């Protein structure tokens, strides 16, 4: 199972740039954008990457799964 550290290379990229680097199985969910929090289910999904976005770039990988 992948962890947050496995996706650190996505920090500083836009969502579109990050999607191009993923295997196609993973899905990016924006948990927070410019201080606005978006609801996301706490249901476990090993292919879900929840990110925090500042401006147009990923500032942090919040969680995986």
Image (cartoon, rainbow, N blue to C red):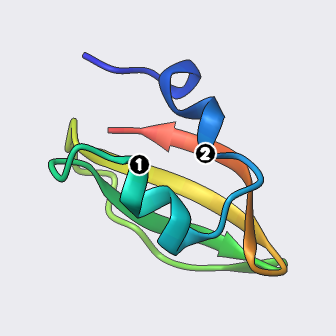
Q: Quadrant of residue 8?
A: top right
Residue in front for this viewpoint, 28 or 22: 22
| Residue 57 sits above or below residue 1 on the image | below
Image location of residue 52, percent across then percent down = 69, 61
> Could you say whether the residue bearing mark 2 is in a helix, strand or loop?
helix
**Vertical side of 63 occupied by 4: above or below:** above
Q: Residue at x 64, y 69 (%)?
A: 14
Q: Residue at x 71, y 46 (%)?
A: 11
Give SS at disc 1: helix
Q: Badge 1 is on which residue?
A: 21
Residue receiving disc 2: 10
Q: CA distance from mark 2 to mark 1?
A: 8 Å
Using the image as rendered, state which of residue 44 and residue 6 is in the foreground. 6
Of the pair 42 and 8, the residue shown nearer to us:
8
Q: Assess whether mark 1 and mark 2 are in contact (beta carbons under 8 angstroms).
A: yes
Snapshot quadrant of residue 56? bottom right
Left or right of residue 19: residue 23? left
Question: In this rendering, is residue 13 above or below 47?
Answer: below
Callout in the foreground (2, 1): 1
Q: Quick check: 36 left or right of 20?
A: right
Label 2 packing within 10 angstroms: few (<14), some (14-19), many (20+): many
Tag 1 or tag 2, which sits nearer the N-term?
2
Which disc, if any, is residue 5? none
Give the percent coordinates (x, y) of residue 59: 79, 55
Residue at the left extreme?
25
Where's the C terminus, which quadrant? Answer: top left
Q: Quadrant of the N terminus?
A: top left
Q: Position of residue 61 (x, y in %)?
A: 62, 43
How packed mark 1 is, by other alpha carbons closer than 10 Å (few <14, some 14-19, many 20 or more), is: few
Q: Residue at x 32, y 63 (%)?
A: 41
- Residue 57 rendering spot, x and y as whole percentages: 75, 68
């Amino acid at each position: 199972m992948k962890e947050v550290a496995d996706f650190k290379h996505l920090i500083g990229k836009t969502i579109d740039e990050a999607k191009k680097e993923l295997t196609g199985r993973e899905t990016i969910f924006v948990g927070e954008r410019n201080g606005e929090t978006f609801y996301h289910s706490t249901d476990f999904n090993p292919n879900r990457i929840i990110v925090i976005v500042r401006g147009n770039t990923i500032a942090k990988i919040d969680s995986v799964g």
